[in-house]
Image (cartoon, rainbow, N blue to C red):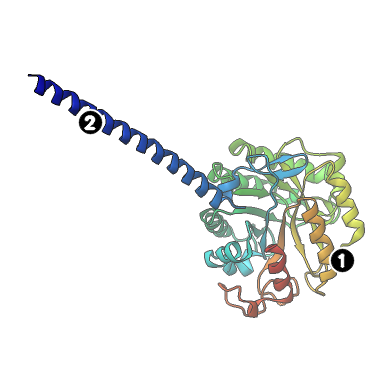
Amino acid sequence: MKKILLFIIISLIVVIGFLYLKKDNNQKSNKQDVKKDVQSSTTIDNNLVSSNGWLEIKNNTLVNEKGNKIQLKGMSTHGIQWYGKFANEEMIKKLRDEWNSNLFRIAMYTAEGGYIENRNLENDVIKIVDTAIKLDMYVIIDWHILSDNNPLTYIKEAKDFFSRMSSKYKDYPNVIYEICNEPNSNVTWSETIKPYANEVIDVIRKNSKNSIIIVGTPTWSQEVDKPMIDPINDKNVMYAFHFYAGTHKDDLRQRVKEAINKIPIFVSEWGVSDASGNGGVYLQEANKWVDFMDENNISWANWSLSDKNESSALLLEGSPIDSLDDKYLSESGKYIKEIMKR
């Protein structure tokens, strides 16, 4: 009887010891797993959407969902009715992986054979947006007014378009809405652009409460001093500034310098050429602008991902639609590659 009792006691001690060791090993294993997860999270931390999430404005600059400053850098298409073939997954992926780009801008012209005449371009926009989302990038849907100069001309169409886009992408932090590219001619901020913007913004906000919205400014998006004294009442609105290095120099840079103390600026289009998209390239002047944007955490999209026969085009005429090899890059393209990879 004593032998049986002793055997039972020894057996219980062995079992309890085994269970304790197993529990201890499991705890160590769990701690190691957590450590691995932290290391993995640190490893994959990047400038893309998965690491930055919903963007917002803080102290007149762009920040991520953690409140840290973020600078978006990327390419803008030329008009997708002409050069949309370059906005394909392989090309956008190469911009991301090889050039460190985290932004892609879709220039959907309204006039000049654009959306007003060809509503099928909306499907092209959706395809490109979905590609950018798949690639974990931020993407600008650009209502690209230009020759139609006054945003009120097609306000009904703009409201319908942005209602559908903001409904479709309301849950995606990737999507940024640029609601009027370059108002120009006799278009004023307070009497034309701001009233237009308020109506379109209301449409977007019914679906998407927090998305970044970019509003164009008078004179081809150069007069950022106008909204500086009469801003839109929306915490996540930014104001477009566009420049071309051969034409726009120190005087406009001073204007932006004064404005960024009061309103958030997004350079949603710029080029190394003159204002026509041709002439140059003006690399010395471009360097001044790039340094200025970097110093002030201003995000930007360069014009343009196309092979158009002009100096602002990224690619040489006749280039393939899926390659960023140096032999296909224009002088502008080689420069943009260098500064985007900084």
188 sits left or right of 340 in the view: right
Q: Position of residue 139 (x, y in %)?
A: 61, 54
151 sits left or right of 49 in the view: right
172 sits left or right of 254 in the view: left
- Check the picture and name the quadrant holding the C terminus: bottom right
Gap in angstroms between the C-alphas marked 1 and 2: 85 Å
Q: Is residue 98 above or below residue 260?
A: below
The amino acid type found where label 2 is placed reads Val
Q: Is residue 210 above or below residue 145?
A: above
- Check the picture and name the quadrant holding the N terminus: top left
Q: Residues within 10 Å of mark 1 (few under 14, many from 20)?
A: some
Instruction: Single out the residue that lies furthest toward the front.
Output: 2
Q: In terms of secondary structure, where does tag 1 sit?
A: loop
Instruction: Single out the residue that lies furthest toward the right.
Output: 251
Q: N-terminal of the two: label 1 or label 2? A: 2
Residue drawn at the location 57% of the way across and 63% of the way down? 97
Q: How many labels sit on residues? A: 2
Instruction: Single out the residue that lies furthest toward the top.
Output: 1
In the depicted view, which residue is nearer to us: 193 or 138? 138
The amino acid type found where label 1 is placed reads Thr
Residue drawn at the location 78% of the way across and 45% of the way down? 264
Q: Quadrant of residue 19?
A: top left
Residue drawn at the location 56% of the way across and 48% of the way down? 42
- Residue 150 disc label: none
Return the residue at label 1.
Answer: 247
Q: Quadrant of residue 112?
A: bottom right
In the depicted view, which residue is nearer to us: 143 or 237? 237
Q: Position of residue 234 (x, y in %)?
A: 73, 36
Return the residue at label 2.
Answer: 14
Q: Position of residue 40 (x, y in %)?
A: 50, 49
In the depicted view, which residue is nearer to us: 212 or 62? 62
